[in-house]
Image (cartoon, rainbow, N blue to C red):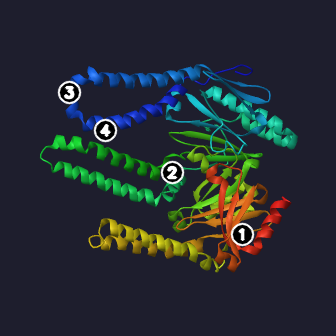
Amino acid sequence: MQNRKFRNHISIIIEQTGGVLLALLIIFIPQFLQNIGEIAEAGRELISGRGFLINIGIVLALLAVIGIQVLIWAKTYISIEENAVIIEKNTFNKRKNTIGIRNISNINTEQNLLEMLLGTCKVKLDTNSRSTADSTDVKIVLKKADALWFQQEVTRRMQVFAAAEQTDGELKAEASVVLNVDLTGEAEDFDIRSDFGDILQHGLFSVNIVSLLILIISTSVIVGEIVQMLEQPELMKSFLGATAGIAVAVFIALSALWDMVKGFLRYYNFRAKRRGSKIYIRYGLFKKVGYTIPVDKIQALRIRQSFVARIGRRYMAEIINVGMGDDQEERNSFLVLYADEKKLEERLSVLLPEFMEAADCQVERQPVSVWAAWMFPAFAYTLCVTGAAAACGFAFGAEKYFLLIWGCAAGLEILLPVCMILKYRTEGMKMDENFLKLTRGYFGKNYLAVKYENIQYVEIKQNPLARICGIGKGYLHLLASSANAEQRIPYFRKNLEDKMKSRMIKR
């Protein structure tokens, strides 16, 4: 494949069109079941008249979509030149994208269930550009062996450009790692391997309370619909009428269930290692993922605690990385799965010792004067809740729904001081010589450690009361995807602003 043009594997057509077909099926099947009686009575319309034309139109539209994807596949070529990866599309409009090897920040691999069955693999290239931080710059689907070759070849060329900044020993060490990269990871010597107990612990502490509530409510709706259906005299007719509602409730329930159990399945066989200036991460059961992350592209370290994990004193670590951020799982690039504090520190010391100083740093709580600064937004919140309750009373009848409307308003007002107390006890900031460390959250807790040199710029804001109290809050901006680029800074003493700026400038 070297020094010649090649195409994506033809299975990319299935991946590109599969989502459209699935969406049509989700829309069509409930409607078909709900109206199956009418369809049976007027079946001839499907093969004559308007019904026939509609069905022919749908089939032709699907064939057109597939045809366009086949054309794009046949006319798209990939090649590796000395200094760049070239993507050429010679369809209706000719386009040629050139991605400089030196600008590639990550080259990662991924296999979904379909790709595992077909023996293919997706290679994903990301660059250092802020403008493309929210999307993968190149996605290439190849046979597994070809994908491995492509990853090794691009990585080798990246190392050639980086050789001037590395010693020979470091370069040889990293080169040996690249040659041993395997998408399954079975033959590799990883520093960290998570067993079934680790995955189970991570899944339990990752459970989203909101998803749990949605699952309970949607399950109750399904059971209620089924009970109501069984009470009807004409069971089949009532079943067909309730099918669409039940299907929607089942879809919501399954989505909530997946949100709860994905932590058990997504990070199956999680393993990681540090070799030279790169971190290698592999995990997945139904979707196998492989990341190769240059340490110098890591912008910040985030340590998370869900509400359940905070109660159980468990922590997990993620990295904010240049170039990654198009997929949800990339926005949360896992480094260490949920573990106790001792195990977290042990694993960080192996994978990312550069941030150990920040991980051990204790954060200072917000100044007490923050309560005065919160009075303005709290007053505005109360006005909004009161106004909304009054409007609902006027629209639906104040007497009939008085208890419901004002009961909800009272609940929202009670929630305000609860959240303010939790926010005060959770959030804070700490500045040391090399790192700025922030904590945020209400029920859960998130720590963020960032080196001053990685901060692009800082915005500081004050409302009138905060200005009187001599405190401020703001945002720091990183070179990352939009989901991670802006990080909120809790209230801090304003006299620390100059100290923060001076350390950013020094770097």
Task: Report if the CB atoms under discs 1 and 2 are less than 8 Å apart.
Answer: no
Say whether residue 83 is left or right of residue 221.
Answer: right
Of label 3 and label 2, which has the lower sequence position? 3
* Closest to the observer, 103 or 184: 103
Identify the secondary structure beneath mark 4. helix
Instruction: Identify the residue position indicated by label 1 in the image.
Output: 430
Q: Quadrant of the C terminus?
A: bottom right
Instruction: Identify the residue position indicated by label 2 in the image.
Output: 263
Q: Residue furthest front?
A: 394
Of label 4 and label 2, which has the lower sequence position? 4
- Mark in front: 1 vs 3: 3
**Label 1 amino acid?**
Lys
Identify the secondary structure beneath mark 1. strand
**Label 2 amino acid?**
Gly
* Closest to the observer, 57 or 235: 57
Of label 3 and label 4, which has the lower sequence position? 4
Task: Report if the CB atoms under discs 3 and 4 are less than 8 Å apart.
Answer: no
Task: Report if the CB atoms under discs 3 and 2 are less than 8 Å apart.
Answer: no
Where's residue 16, x and y in %?
52, 30
Instruction: Identify the residue position indicated by label 3 in the image.
Output: 42
* Closest to the observer, 220 or 407: 407
**Label 4 amino acid?**
Pro
Instruction: Identify the residue position indicated by label 4 in the image.
Output: 30
Say whether residue 292 is left or right of residue 20.
Answer: right
Of label 1 and label 3, which has the lower sequence position? 3
Q: Quadrant of the N terminus?
A: top right
Identify the secondary structure beneath mark 2. helix
